[in-house]
Amino acid sequence: MEVSFLINGVSQRVDVDADTPLLWVIRDILDLKGTKFGCGKAACGACTIHIDGEAVRACAYAVKFAEGKSITTIEGLSVGDKLHPVQQAWMEEVVPQCGYCQPGFMMATAALLEKIPQPTDQDIDDNIVNVCRCATYYRMRKAIHRAAAIKQETR
Amino acid sequence: MSTENKKKGFSRRKFLTRSAIGLGVILGSGYLSRNLIRRYLAGAINELEPSYQGNTKSPSLWFEITAANEIILHSPKVEMGQGTFTGLAQIAADELEVDISQIQVVHAASASGNLDGLSTGGSTSISGLWQPLRELAATMREMVKQAAAQQMGVDVAELSVNNGVITAAGKSLTYGAVVKEVSEWVVPKTPPLKPIKDYKFVGKPVPRVDLRDKVLGAPIFGMDATMPDMLFGAVVRPPMIGATYAGADTAAAAKMPGVVKIVSEPDFVGVVATSRMAAENAKQAIQANWTTEKSWQTADIEAMIKVGQGTPYVIQKSGNAQRLLAAGEDIITAEFKSPIGAHAQLEPNGAVAFVEGDKATIMISTQVVKLTRGEVAKRLGIAEENVNIQPTFLGGGFGRRLHTPNAVQAAVLSKAVGKPVKCFFDRQEEFQNDTFRPPTHHVLKAKLDADGMIAAIEHNVSSGDVMFGSPMFPALAEPLLGADVGAWRGGMIQYGAIPNYQTISWRVKLPFATSWWRSLGLLANTFAIESFMDELALKAGKDPVEYRLAQIQDDEAGTRLKSVIRAAAEKAGWRDEVVDGRAMGFAASTDAQTPCAQVVEVSIENEEIKVHKVTCAIDPGLAVNPDQVRAQCEGAIIMGLSATMYEQMIVKDSVLYPTIYGPYRMALMRDAPREIDVVILENTGVPGAVGEPPLGPIGAAIANAVFRLTGRRLREMPLAIA
Ligand code: FES
Ligand code: FES
């Protein structure tokens, strides 16, 4: 099946099995490797991307539903050399350890800040439910608050 | 020679003397018991973790200097999140006299020759490379300076060096410019190292060198690795405990779209296809047969893991605890348990392999580059030198990547089709084919004297294997040691002022693979011992912190342990009372010579244990990067909390469950303490272990706090109060 969509501002057309998870289209066909495979069952969030601004777990999203949608991956979060406030905050708090889960968390956070620009700790607990085995949660929480502040300043 | 070198040299000499001469004497004395040899070895291993076995003499294997004056450091240790690359860059920059931004750390391919004979693990990467890397970097700097002196026609003594630029008599050359003109290096004698106080990067909280890549989501992991013209493979893995592969019906799979080849081997069956989906679908269509001997349930495993079953090995003994604890009404006894634990690292195991004739290239996340190479070479029947392992960044290690059969499987698939093949575990396979943290059972006994101090104490631990049976561990040592070194890690009594104490390890061979899991036996052993210490303190009517301090000996290890205990208690404002529904809990441990103490603040909310704050004091000897020491403590604390409070695998009809995150409950953002306060002490001047030691105390500290809140002593991980 042919599917067309916009990804990180570039329009793409792929011809694949309609039920292929969008994750594999992004990683294997479009060669954008920042979106990670952690479980394939919508249970870890490593594959979190934005579809029309909503955080979505790409491993559980069949490519056929992507027709005409606008997709953003971690590669599209920064613009040129300019990091997104979330990425900037992540740098400043030195969040990543192994780093594997981090794109998913940053994508989930970026989407959260669009909905709730100044999230409380409770908002963070309720909305950031990805898995980090290196358990960098302590710094992530600080980075999320910092990202909110950076975003506020640059608005 | 600076002070820290002297110290290091001293302790190393001491060890060599003890292992070479000491062991000889013991083995030579026929009348001495095997137990004594065992305890001697156990003591030596407990103190000294093997850390590095590779090149220490050829700077050019390690450093590549580019024309742009960048230094590429080829690391034989892998980066799995622990921050090793950053520490190595700091160390190298200081001795090379360059800015840290000029250094780029990469994984050394095995073909580069810079190959570590050991693994990356055991919290030893920085401590093991501390001395050799400084010497290599200093030597490299001298090599470049000598070449520069020649090129500039001046004496080496006239050169000054700054940020990789060499200046003399008004002229300047970058390292890169000097190196370009060199056709052959002369390796000089190792120059003296700088005093630590002169280091600009070592000891400073510099940002991780891999930070930007990781924030950009750069393709740096094994899962991201590709090769041109690559196909996709999938391998059918054993679905249950004890399953032996007994052939498969592959007819239906072979006909499916996209399938290139079905690969049937004596020990497994796999498929190669043109896309991941095609490979996955075909794999589902393969009907594999398995033979099993017995159906296993969790209860069977629990019945095996029991102190009193199998052979006891006394691994630590001082005085005569056995006699004192043999009988009597005043003997205090307690039991503790921990479950099977999964690694659950975020990046599943996988590999991309290309076998061409008698050569093979494998890109893979591995903690054991040399072992992986050897296994692939053996399976393909080619020379080890013909296999090039290109390690990638690891999406978590924790011991999971000390076993890499996936490299062999990818290589076999690639050989069958003559093209590069990528294959990996899915998440269910990760959970079911993990090399688990073994379950444990602990029995502790003690007797108090008239003042309430411990007169005798004994710790019995029953555990599945951790190191035994692994190709990493010399099989020869098994009968000599008897008990598994990894299983009793953290299991020895660290209160050396107690007159009589002993530790007994009971070995159990489980029917499924168990292995290293970050900190090995430390978490469970400390959970048991430090919960028991808390009980004894309360029984004696003493403050648990003072009670511990009073029973620690005054040697170097004891002094360091006491200082972290005091530091944690002081920083946390330790008080043994419940205030506003919150209680504190205390515990301490020593792992690989790094002592660590933690105070937790806990409440019960909606019938759940809530950890609000953790104060952690650690003495890694010297913190090469204090910010990363902090990061390791934060991560280890939350990972340990997760294992203590939520995680467990069960066995039902020989199948291991759960098979997915969520049901395999792990700590999430909402479970992480809002406050983690880390105090770093540096009492030896030499970097020691960091990645695992802070995992020790957390479990017991939480359970001890819960006791104060509920009056209930929780004796089983995962902790349950409902
Ligand atoms: S890979 Fe998609 S949620 Fe885990
Ligand atoms: S940083 Fe390793 S899993 Fe999150």
Image (tube, coloured by chain):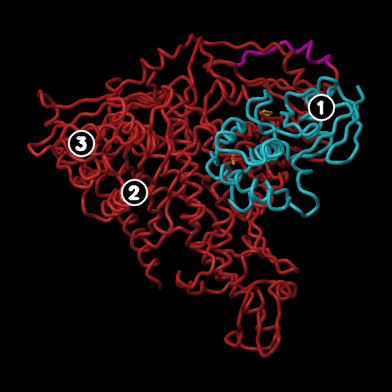
Chain colours: A cyan, B red
Residue name at image x 57 percent, y 37 percent = B401
Q: Which residues are magenta?
A: B245-256
* Labels 2 and 3 within one chain: yes
Residue B129 inside the magenta-drawn segment: no
> Disc count in the image?
3
Q: In the picture, which quadrant includes the C terminus of chain B?
A: top left
Residue type, mark 3 in image: Ala
Element under disc 3: helix
Instruction: Read off the chain for label 3.
Output: B
Between residue B663 and residue B134, name the one nearer to us.
Answer: B663
Point out the tag, 2 or 1, that comes first from the N-terminus: 1
Depth check, front residue: B256 or B642: B642
- Quarter holding the N terminus of chain B is bottom left
Callout 1 and callout 3 share a chain: yes
Is residue B183 visible to us here? no
Question: Picture quarter containing residue B55?
Answer: bottom right
Report the side of B308 relative to B247 (left or right): left
What amino acid is found at the position of numbered circle 2 in the picture? Answer: Ala
Tell me where residue A47 appears, x and y as whole percent: 70, 32
Q: Is residue A59 left or right of residue B474?
A: right
Q: Residue at x 83, y 15 (%)?
A: B256
Q: CA distance from mark 2 to mark 1?
A: 54 Å
Q: Which residue is mark 2?
A: B568
- The numbered disc on residue A41 is none
Task: Identify residue for label 3.
Answer: B537
Q: Is residue A91 left or right of residue B585?
A: right
Circle 1 chain: B
Quarter location, residue B379: top right
- Name the amino acid, label 1: Ser
The quarter of the displayed image where residue B94 is located: bottom right
Mark whose residue sits in front, 2 or 1: 2
